[in-house]
């Protein structure tokens, strides 16, 4: 029998592989551990080289998924285990309870009456209810309820206002077994833990944020047509420091270069320069590493008066001598001296690490999957090495072609 191709991971890479396979006549099952497809890209403000919003690439792919009956997808689905060989794999998938079924019309009444709040964390706005919808670019465009926060039948206020019989508070976790001929692993990346770099005070200072947190802050400003404010006091920052290689190229943390961090910080600085002409952005770097079309970001930044590029390694971040703000201590290579300058916010360019998944494949010394191990198990995009969106899409298309080979 010709079993479908299983794709583990519903980010931009997994989605790309899925639509390419399906439009070539192949059956596809796509699973994503979060409640929505889109992965990290769905929360971006924009991405290079064209500085497009995430809707530029994701929206058309969502439309391709909806219109293609060869694609089946599960959200809230985690891989429990997988066994078998090329042509005949068996995967056990754990489905978390969504508590809202497909009758949902996205009216939002359940969130309006929900009294429970989700804990604040990356990607969640303050005051997000237990009944929620993805605040990025959601697909499917339906609400779900956080089972770890919801009081279920003890509250049931959402059931009282839902006219579509969409609330299922008694839903529980389930398992499903999938047979697959090929498996594409598109589990993507997670940021290195900024808390491990103690001299940057990420855990102590709310105005020290990661590059992904800053990306989501900018995205929220775009969605809400609001101004950027710093977390500590809600004021608009006037000086922002971007620290490159935060933990990267460091034998104590990540000994490798994550390839995309320089482009990300330049993109952030150019975004700020366009929207906040009075704001000063200074990027502290060891080396500027860009390639291909991303090199134009560096040229654009060099021509901007309010963007400063400083070659020098930051040693420490500490509270400012003033009432608010942060002090950045850096060894300025060009001037040959140590500086201590005040900034309102600091953005850490954290490196990319492979997201964990229950698939037994060989990895390199950094935890990324090695390609070419099996004709049936195919790692793709940033679970092999750090990649930007453009490179990930190309690699995911190549993976789809590999999966079609018998």
Image (cartoon, grey):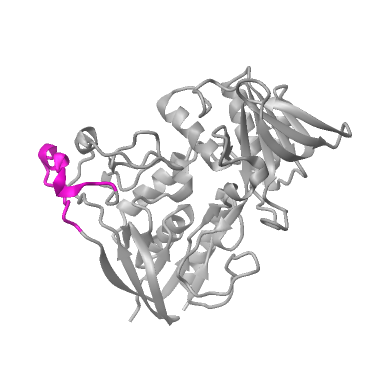
Which quarter of the figure has residue 224? top left
**Which residue is rendered at x = 58% and y = 23% of the image?**
237
- Which residue occupies the foreground of this view, 158 or 306? 158
In screen coordinates, is 102 left or right of 42? left
- Can the viewer see residue 318 in this picture? yes
Residue 392 coordinates in the image, percent (x, y): 55, 55
Residue 27 coordinates in the image, percent (x, y): 34, 67
- Which residue occupies the foreground of this view, 395 or 247? 247
- Can the viewer see residue 166 in this picture? no
In screen coordinates, is 356 left or right of 104? right
- Does the magenta run of residues contain 22? no
- Secondary structure mostly seen in magenta is loop
Residue situated furthest top in the rendering: 278
Residue 330 coordinates in the image, percent (x, y): 77, 36
Tag count: 0
> Does residue 102 lie above or below 379 as drawn?
above
> Does residue 75 lie above or below 81 as drawn?
above
- Which residue occupies the foreground of this view, 2 or 177? 177
Quadrant in the picture for the N terminus: bottom left
In screen coordinates, is 383 left or right of 71? right
Give the residues in magenta: 149-171
Residue 299 coordinates in the image, percent (x, y): 73, 34
**Which residue is rendered at x = 67% and y = 50% of the image?**
247
> Does residue 156 lie above or below 170 as drawn?
above
Residue situated furthest right in the rendering: 336
Which quarter of the figure has residue 373? bottom right
**Which residue is rendered at x = 21% and y = 60% of the image?**
172
């Amino acid at each position: 029998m010709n079993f479908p191709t299983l794709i583990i991971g519903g980010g931009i890479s997994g989605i790309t592989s899925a639509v390419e396979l399906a439009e070539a006549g192949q059956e596809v099952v796509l699973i994503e551990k979060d409640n929505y497809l889109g992965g990290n890209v769905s929360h971006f403000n924009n991405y290079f080289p064209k500085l497009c919003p995430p809707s530029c690439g994701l929206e058309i792919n969502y439309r391709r998924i909806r219109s293609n009956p060869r694609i089946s997808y599960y959200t809230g689905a985690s891989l429990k285990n997988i066994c078998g060989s090329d042509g005949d794999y068996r995967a056990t998938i754990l489905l978390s309870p969504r508590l809202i079924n497909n009758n949902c019309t996205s009216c939002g009444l359940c969130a309006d009456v929900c009294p429970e709040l989700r804990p604040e964390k990356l990607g969640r706005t303050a005051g997000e209810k237990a009944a929620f919808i993805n605040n990025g670019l959601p697909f499917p465009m339906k609400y779900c309820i956080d089972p770890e926060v919801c009081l279920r039948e003890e509250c049931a206020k959402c059931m009282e206002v839902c006219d579509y019989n969409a609330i299922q508070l008694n839903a529980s976790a389930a398992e499903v077994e999938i047979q697959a001929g090929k498996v594409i692993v598109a589990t993507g990346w997670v940021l290195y833990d900024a808390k491990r770099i103690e001299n940057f005070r990420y855990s102590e200072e709310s105005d020290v944020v990661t590059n992904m947190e800053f990306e989501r802050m900018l995205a929220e400003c775009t969605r809400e047509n609001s101004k950027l404010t710093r977390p500590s006091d809600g004021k608009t920052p006037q000086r922002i420091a971007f620290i490159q290689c935060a933990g990267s190229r460091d034998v104590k943390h990540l000994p490798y270069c994550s390839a995309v961090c320089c482009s990300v910080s330049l993109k952030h600085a150019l975004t700020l320069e366009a929207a906040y002409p009075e704001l000063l952005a200074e990027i502290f770097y060891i080396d500027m590493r860009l390639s291909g079309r991303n090199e134009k970001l560096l040229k654009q930044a060099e021509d901007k008066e309010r963007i400063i590029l400083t070659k020098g390694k930051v040693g420490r971040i500490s509270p400012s001598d003033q009432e608010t703000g942060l002090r950045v201590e850096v060894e300025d290579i060009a001037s040959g001296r140590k500086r201590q300058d005040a900034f309102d916010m600091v953005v850490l360019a954290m490196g990319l690490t492979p997201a964990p998944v229950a698939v037994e494949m060989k990895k390199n010394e950094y935890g990324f999957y090695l390609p070419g191990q099996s004709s049936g198990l195919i790692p793709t995009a940033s679970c092999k090495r750090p990649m930007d969106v453009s490179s990930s899409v190309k690699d995911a298309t190549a993976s789809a072609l590999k999966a079609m080979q018998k």
